[in-house]
Amino acid sequence: MPERVRGSLDWGTYANSFAFRLALVRRQRGLSQEALAHKAGMHRNQVSNLERARSNREPFISDPQLSTVYRLAVALDVPPTYLLPDANGLLPEQSPELTDGSRVEKELYERLAGEADG
């Protein structure tokens, strides 16, 4: 995302948070990157790049399209907000998941467990 569009938002921190969430939910669902890619109709390399917050294009930070986020959410059987950091509030410059990843991991585990129970 060009600096003029991104503004003060440190996109790399949000890309890393998305990557963390995607990998966590995928593992919770017992899927390999290959299996998730197949279910979502994309190439395994794309899933791998998203989970590493990497892109082949400058600035080399992943920036998935909304359709990609929704395809992954459908394939993982979760609401898209599970994959999006800080989806329920205003965004600080950096994603707080970088400093409080264990809290986020716990919340996602609880959400996924609640779905299984309900």
Image (tube, grey):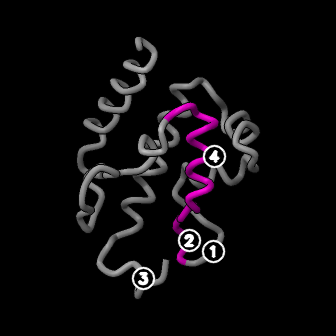
Q: Look at the numbered disc 4 and give the secondary structure of its residue.
A: helix
Name, please, the residue furthest toward the bottom. 4
Q: Which disc, if any, is residue 5?
A: 3
Q: CA distance from mark 3 to mark 1?
A: 16 Å
Residues marked 3 and 4 touching at CB (< 8 Å)? no
Residue 5 is covered by the magenta coloring: no
Q: Look at the numbered disc 3 and give the secondary structure of its residue.
A: helix
Mark 4, residue position: 71
Question: Which tag, 3 or 4, sits closer to the chain's start?
Answer: 3
Residues marked 1 and 2 touching at CB (< 8 Å)? yes
Question: Which tag, 3 or 1, sits closer to the chain's start?
Answer: 3
Q: Look at the numbered disc 2 and give the secondary structure of its residue.
A: loop
Q: Residue at x 42, y 82 (%)?
A: 5
- Asked where in the image residue 14 lies, by quadrant, the reply is bottom left
Residues marked 2 and 4 touching at CB (< 8 Å)? no
Front of the two marks 3 and 2: 3
The magenta segment: 59-78
Question: Which tag, 3 or 2, sits closer to the chain's start?
Answer: 3
Q: Is residue 13 above or below residue 40?
A: below
Q: Residue at x 54, y 53 (%)?
A: 52
Q: CA distance from mark 2 to mark 4?
A: 22 Å
Mark 2, residue position: 60
> Where residue 30 appears, x then y in whole percent?
60, 23
Inspect the image, locate mark 3, and give the three-letter code of the amino acid beneath it. Val
Q: Residue at x 28, y 63 (%)?
A: 94
Inspect the image, locate mark 2, and give the three-letter code of the amino acid beneath it. Phe
Mark 1, residue position: 57
Q: Quadrant of the C terminus?
A: top left
Front of the two marks 1 and 4: 4
